Amino acid sequence: MQPARRTPLASGTTPASLTSRASDRPRGGLSALGHRVAWAAAETILCDEDDTGALVPPGAGVCDRAVRGLDESLARSSSDLRRGFWVLSVLLEFLPFFVILTPRRMTSLPLARRLAYLEALENHRIGLLSMLLVAFKVPLCVPAFEEGEELRGTGFDRATLSTRRIMLAEGVRASQEEAA
């Protein structure tokens, strides 16, 4: 058996396997399970009530922005953190059986039952279960409220968090207040 032949490289070139880093490759930090769990959690955390009291899920763009923010953050993190978040995703997915005594996965629950599950987690007497919800809630809500209608709902006066504020001179501001 002969060893595999290597093709010689042109002078001054390096193999692509040595030049491409893992951070250069387009890859998310969430597994498929983690993505489904994060989407269901974002949809539940960000849902609202209409005038009749019925639950209204947020738009797909809001959930997508929240999950994409989490996914991109985990993609830039260590492999240990990604594996840890996978474990947290598995726990959040399969704990409804123990928390609200429902023999279904979180992603298969209807929105009202998911909300009851997340509220039960938040108010659970075991603090680690409450922290499980916080591990998803904070990194999902930060990107969700950074732009769009959600940002305006917080009372922020600009289109995005990164939009620069235009400061008015005191004389101009005083004349605008008098005109109003």
Image (cartoon, rainbow, N blue to C red):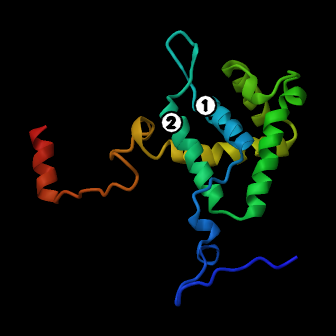
Q: Position of residue 28 (x, y in %)?
A: 63, 53
Q: Residues within 10 Å of mark 1 (few under 14, many from 20)?
A: many
Q: Nearer the viewer, residue 123 or 146?
A: 146
Q: CA distance from mark 1 to mark 2?
A: 9 Å
Q: Position of residue 102 (x, y in %)?
A: 85, 21
- Quarter assignment of residue 47: top right
Residue at 64 percent of width and 73 percent of height: 17
Q: Secondary structure at mark 2?
A: helix
Q: Which residue is mark 1?
A: 43
Q: Nearer the viewer, residue 80 or 48?
A: 80
Residue lying farthest to the top in this orientation: 52
Q: Which residue is mark 2?
A: 62
Q: Disc number at residue 79?
A: none
Precedes in sequence: disc 1 or disc 2 = 1
User: Where is the N terminus found, in terms of image quarters?
Assistant: bottom right
Q: Position of residue 13 (x, y in %)?
A: 54, 84
The correct choice, above or below, for 144 with respect to 83 in the image is above
Residue at 65 percent of width and 56 percent of height: 74
Q: Nearer the viewer, residue 59 or 47?
A: 59
Amino acid at pointer 1? Glu
Q: Position of residue 120 (x, y in %)?
A: 78, 29
User: Where is the C terminus found, in terms of image quarters?
Assistant: top left
- Quarter assignment of residue 35: top right
Q: Residues within 10 Å of mark 2 (few under 14, many from 20)?
A: many
Q: Secondary structure at mark 1?
A: helix
- Quarter assignment of residue 34: top right
Residue at 79 percent of width and 54 percent of height: 84
Q: Is residue 5 left or right of residue 67?
A: right
Amino acid at pointer 2? Val
